[in-house]
Amino acid sequence: MYICPCKGIKESDVEKLGRAGITCPEQLAAVLGIDDGETCCGRCLNNIADIVTIASQEHLLCSASSHR
Ligand code: FES
């Protein structure tokens, strides 16, 4: 599923960032290259909370499995 159709960013891309420990909104927006519309439409930035949730869940799953 696409998180950002403009830049072709998929949910799996966000999950990968989460596994790398990138979970805060500012970092995610910077790494994904999304902003408030200066260089892209910025619609996905309105969903940054959902992007953070996806990354955080993946980070927690990854952390939990590495402690087994
Ligand atoms: S939807 Fe992400 S930049 Fe347009």
Image (cartoon, grey):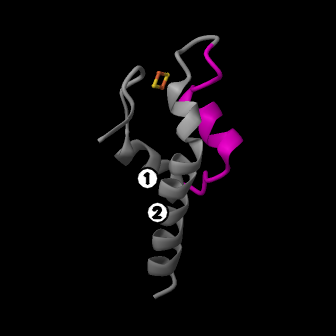
Q: Which amino acid type is marked by label 1?
A: Glu
Q: Which mark is residue 50?
A: none
Q: Is residue 32 magenta?
A: yes
What is the spatial separation of the Cα atoms under label 2 and label 1, in whole angstroms?
6 Å
Q: Which residues are magenta?
A: 20-37
Q: Which residue is mark 1?
A: 15
Residue at left offset 61%, top offset 53%: 23
Q: Which residue is mark 2?
A: 58
Residue 55, how many percent across, how many down?
51, 55
| Figure quadrant of the N terminus | top left
Residue 66, relative to residue 20: is it above or below? below
Residue 38, relative to residue 43: is it above or below? above
Q: Is residue 2 magenta?
A: no
Residue at left offset 53%, top offset 57%: 53
Sequence-wise first label, 2 or 1: 1
Residue at left offset 47%, top offset 70%: 62
Secondary structure of the residue carrying numbered label 2: helix
Contact between labelled residues 1 and 2, with CB atoms less than 8 Å apart: yes
Residue 46, how many percent across, how many down?
57, 35
